[in-house]
Amino acid sequence: MMSSLPTGSLPLVARFHTKSNPCEAAVDWDLKRVKPLADYRIYVELEGGRKGIFDMKPYLDHGVFRELRDVHYFAQVAILYGAVTWPHEQDIASETFLAEMTACE
């Protein structure tokens, strides 16, 4: 049973994996790479080829994200299950990065 995408949704990009699930499809906003930068920013590469800088500063005064003010902890950023995460389970969905990042080459 196929469902249609809501109006304004990004197109799906079919990609077949050989490691775990051979039929798993990725979407063009799946995170490919993250790298911590100075001033609480994160460099982001998405599967669809987009690259950008995401500013975490607006989040640092809220709840669980306060711990990210420690620059050594902030530098432990990684991708887990398609989300940007840190060791104590703070995470940000790739959709948020797509909506708020500043594009770069």
Image: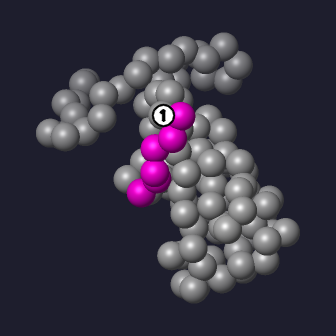
| Image position of 33 (left or right of 94) | right
| Image position of 66 (left or right of 72) | left
State the residue at coordinates (55%, 84%).
62
Residue 52 percent across, percent down from the top left: 52, 45
Mark 1 surroundings: few (<14), some (14-19) or many (≥20) residues within 10 A: some
Residue 51 percent across, percent down from the top left: 53, 38
Please say if 35 is above or below 30: below
Local SS, label 1: loop
Residue 89 percent across, percent down from the top left: 69, 66
* Color scheme of the displayed model: one colour
Whether residue 95 is visible here, answered yes or no, is no
Provide the residue span drawn in magenta. Answer: 100-105
Residue 102 falls inside the magenta stretch = yes
Q: Nearer the viewer, residue 4 or 8?
A: 8
Please say if 81 is above or below 71: above
Residue 80 percent across, percent down from the top left: 67, 48
Whether residue 88 is visible here, answered yes or no, is yes
Please say if 30 is above or below 26: below
Choose top left, top right, bottom left or bottom right for residue 63.
bottom right
Please say if 90 is above or below 78: below
Choose top left, top right, bottom left or bottom right for residue 28.
top left
Please state which amino acid type lies under the numbered disc 1: Arg
Residue at the disc numbered 1: 50
State the residue at coordinates (42%, 57%).
100
The quadrant of the rendering that contains the N terminus is top left
State the residue at coordinates (57%, 73%).
57
Name the residue furthest front: 105
Residue 74 falls inside the magenta stretch = no
